[in-house]
Amino acid sequence: MKETLSLGRIAGVRVGLHWSVLVIVVLVTLALARGRFPEAHPGHSPTVYWALALLTAVAFLASLLAHELAHAVVARRNGVEVEGITLWMLGGAARLRGEAPTPGTELRIAGVGPLMSVVVGGLMAGLAVWLDALHVSGLWVEAVAWLAAINIVLAVFNALPAAPLDGGRLLRAFLWHRSGDRLRATQGASAAGKALGWFMVVTGFGAVLFAGNLSGLWSALIGWFLIAAATAEARQAEVQGVLKGVPVSRVMTPAPVTVPSWTTVSEFLGEGPFGPYRHSAFPVVLPDGAVAGLITMGIVNRTPQQGRSRTTVGDVMRPLTDVVTVAPGDPVVDLLPRLQESDVHRALVLDEDRLVGIVSLADITRALSWPTVSSR
């Protein structure tokens, strides 16, 4: 899930929002401003209901962020690098670079999320009781109580033993510890996730068709997401099993064609598609041969035609700091999620500062078609 708006870094972890997070804000705000608040505490102006509902929705997003930050912080403390956190329509996702090395690490990373939600829920419940004792407006107490309840519900739901929920991670850690086989453990957790997903889809549509309860559509949507995510997770585990132990050097394209940074965009286009530039992405090098970045045909096509004769590749390239880089001896399984998150789906392979290759998702796909994959 790619972020639409970056919120910077919190506790050293990059945090962003996907545009679909607006769905959460809108649904929560509508449900509270048009339903729960006026029903429980009538007599206030619509402006008060809407303002407090919006504030409560934002506080709910903050609690989701706390849940994901807990995952990220514990992952980093256990040696698993974190790419970042993205909040989106169905909650949040902490993107980890690589897998937990042991079942114990998996247990700690997965378990801290629901625990954080329970802590937040408990704090909100305590705050609601305190505010009520101070005879603060019942509407404010209602908002805080709702936050307490929704965080407890979030903790319970996430603790269900079904991938990709946190409980699915806990189940995988248990199965992994029992069998010693990470792939079989992932398949078991994914099967549980698909079973839960289908249960939610069937019961959700059943509620709509037989009881006229439109909230069943939300349950069905979450169930469908669980099915898709659990299926993708099982497939990813199979891919990781095939690529286990394979270094990047086995799948990369060695000695890729490079483009000098001083080449104009017009000159670059004049050499293709039948000249040396026959691909769609090329490393860009400086006069001393050092790699400076990556140029893609997408970037070239966005360059205004009237300025291409004066614009150099170095002016419009994606700088090296914004490109995925990897060493030739790094595992392909650790690179794969980084490529999937990247806009260009390519990585430059550097041996210290020397460019030795380029690797794309297509290269890894071809590797998956090999009859046997071995690191030897």
Image (cartoon, rainbow, N blue to C red):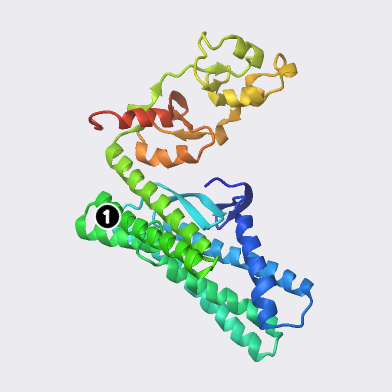
> Please, which residue is most extreme toward the front here?
210
**Residue to which mark 1 is pinned:** 185
Q: What residue type is disc 1 on?
A: Ala
Q: Nearer the viewer, residue 153 or 85?
A: 153
Determine the secondary structure under disc 1: helix
Up/down of 136 relative to 46, above or below:
below
Q: Nearer the viewer, residue 221 or 262?
A: 221
Residue 43 picture location, percent across and down: 76, 83
Direction from residue 315 to residue 252 in the image, left or right: left
Q: Nearer the viewer, residue 364 or 318?
A: 364
Residue 308 picture location, percent across and down: 70, 17
Up/down of 38 relative to 204, above or below:
below
Residue 110 picture location, percent across and down: 39, 61
Up/down of 303 relative to 9, above or below:
above
Residue at 56% x, 54% y: name it: 88
Residue 73 makes an appearance in the image: no
Residue 149 picture location, percent across and down: 53, 76
Residue at 55% x, 61% y: name it: 65
